[in-house]
Image (tube, helix red, strand yellow):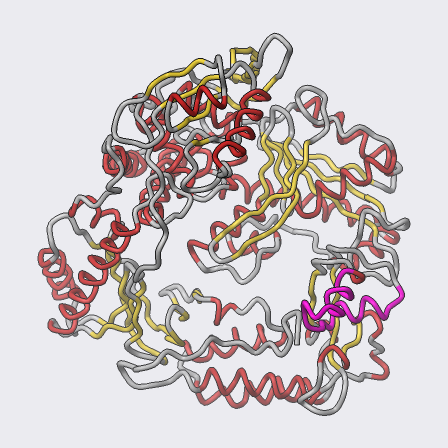
Amino acid sequence: MTAHKQPDDLLYGASPDEGLVALELVASDAGDDMELFVRSGDSLERKREPFRPFLLMADDKLARQAAPGAAVTPLHGPGVLTVLVDFDSWAECQRVKTRLGRLTGRSAGAADAPYWFVNDPIQQHLMRTGRTLFKGLRFDQLRRLVFDLECRTTPGFEFCHPEREGDRIIAIAMADNRGWKQVLSGAEMDERDLIEAFVKIVRDHDPDVIEGHNLFQFDLPYLAARARRHGVPLAIGRDGSAPATRPSRFTAGERVVSYTRFDVFGRHVVDTLFLLQSYDAAHRSLEGFGLKEAAMHFGLAVADREYVEGAEITRVFERDPRRLMRYALHDAVETEALARLLSLSAFAQAAMVPFSYQNICLRGNAAKIDAMMLRAYLARGAALPLPDKPRPFAGGYTDLFVRGVVRNVHRCDVRSLYPSLMLAHRIAPRNDSQGVFLALLEKLRSFRIEAKEKTRRAGDQAERLHWDALQTAFKVLINSFYGYLGFEQARFSDFDAAERVTAEGRRLLKWMTEWLRDHGAQPVELDTDGIYFVPPPGGEQEQEAFRSSFQKALPNGIEIEFDEAYPVMFSYRMKNYALRTAGGEIILKGAALRSRGLEPYLRAFLRDFIRLKLEGQDKELPRLREEYARAIRDGMWPIERLARTESLQDTPSAYAVKVDRRRRGRSAAYELALRSGREYKAGDQVSYYVTGEKKNVSVHQNAKLTTDFDPAHRDENKAYYLAKLDALFERLCASEGDEDPETEEPELDLQTEGGAE
């Protein structure tokens, strides 16, 4: 199979050069260069080309003030930023950007700044040259290396910390995408030797991508700290350098994560935890983000997988180090499989978007569309507008028509609802003088149709995966064009256009709902672009005629897809429901039914309750509740099933200062850390349970560490845990209701303490 050829400058950039896997800025007194890493089969060529950083400014006068003597190129069109200014070095470009801030009183990120600056030399070079990564390559041609650390934890603590004297790395497991795997054992070498051996393996294998699960928040910071402790250079860059670090933030849906970013010269760092969170923001189907949960969810778990609980790692290492090494190696193998599954779309996007691959995996889709738009304007020599002024506007249409258990539920999806409406009604940013927005959208849609057809006709698995990854990448970008209109940081944002799109969407979906009712169907739930409904009675022939009539009744340019039919659905509340497939699989949707913040026993009860509801065993629900209640009353469970585990975002001392200054409430996890006398750090995890006899207690005053629990003298607060069970049971039972509920049920929240009281 030959890799896909990119025939379109608008989507893929103007450069036809293939095989680029990385590029890095190399500064010198003679002028800055970009070092390019180009792969051809198993060989890697390194070459350099000049780098010319740039700034866009409002006019010649401002350019002469800020950068006298610099090369100025006029831009055409009605935009506000009408000149492009070139520089010989990144350092000089940065100095002029700072000078512009003083001259104009506007920072580079201000929407009304009369200048524009891309604070990433790699993105700048890709935008100016029309280059993108991975052109002409298949995903399996990348060299990818996964690693996973296992660490010893000092007794009395629940999680290892790199600054703690008694903690250390006890295993480094590695695997690549070509079947190689190895584990470095702390039973056979000391920590310094472990780190030195790891660095040598990375240099010898020379991967394009380094992957891991929770790399940014655990493995890389821990490894870097321990390397510093031993004076070992963490020289894993392609130039022999250690990683560069800086604080950063990652966003996936409503989840915002602060982390330390690691940049490795000539390589990309990809964290499958972040990939997993991005996946869940779109699919809302995961109950947790742990590696083992993800491997089981996607069917990637290693056969005869070795499992070791986190709290048991140190003990297992001391008693049976070979078992721990098997466990660590299985972690690495499953992470490689997870990365292979979740990275395909990002790999395909990298051939289109002028970002590094690492940034493709970290940046939002609106930012990617913005970069493609800006690249097109630079290529055309067109002036840029100022962003639109943000304002609130009405969003999409969601509705709930039936609560409780509903049988024979079908789903119809409007195929790319908002993009279809934008194309049908020619809705685009009013400041897009070059017409790039709709042109990009149209090309992505037509290319996706082509890629879907080639996926269907593919002759082998590798070819099928290639084309499917490509069509998925197109789909992800296509469905983000509406969000781009309302993205405050987008250069071509247009909040009036965004409002018009949602208004057209609400109008269409309400019409579709009425059509279903008028033709004998019962709508159950509507969620932005799809409708769950019970179809009218009839056999397959009648159902096919019903679906055909529905499609024919839709406006031109609007197409619907009929997804899988479900024998039964439990409609709990808006955007929160459970489905049982024909094969018996149970799918949970929505935060209220996945409830990651609940104690383990409540999560288990919620799953069991829903299973009985979907199986029509309502008479068994009181028995289920009593079974759980009896287990609490009789102390039948290990305390971990009742306990909560929280990560400390601050040091305990910093928490105490905030409490004293009334900047936050008291938290059980921090209070326990302070009372323990142990040296807890930011990032440590604290597991605790609630003691006492009354159901209404102050949690932070009645909490104990799970490590202090004595099974021979149980002291958990049974009334407290029973009350939480009853509250969940009553809330779930109250979900049954009539059609057309007038009010939405409040968010399911059984937390009495979520970091503060």
Instruction: Report the front residue among 731 and 327.
Output: 731
Instruction: Report the front residue among 732 and 444.
Output: 444
Quadrant of res 169: top right
* Place of residue 415 in the rendered image (x, y in percent of width and height, measured from the top left): 25, 51
Residue at horizontal 37%, vertical 25%? 59
Residue at horizontal 46%, vertical 60%? 285
Q: Is residue 257 visible?
A: yes
* Place of residue 739 in the rendered image (x, y in percent of width and height, measured from the top left): 27, 82
Range of magenta residues: 654-677
Predominant SS along the magenta part:
helix
Instruction: Report the front residue among 130 and 611.
Output: 130
Instruction: Report the front residue among 291 and 89.
Output: 89
740 relative position to 717: left or right: left
Residue at horizontal 54%, vertical 28%? 99
656 relative position to 570: left or right: right
Quadrant of res 652: bottom right
* Place of residue 459 in the rendered image (x, y in percent of width and height, measured from the top left): 34, 31
Residue 440 highlighted magenta (yes or no): no
Q: Is residue 136 visible?
A: no
Query: How many numbered marks, from 0 up?
Result: 0
> Relative to residue 517, is residue 19 depicted above or below?
above
* Place of residue 388 in the rendered image (x, y in percent of width and height, measured from the top left): 33, 45
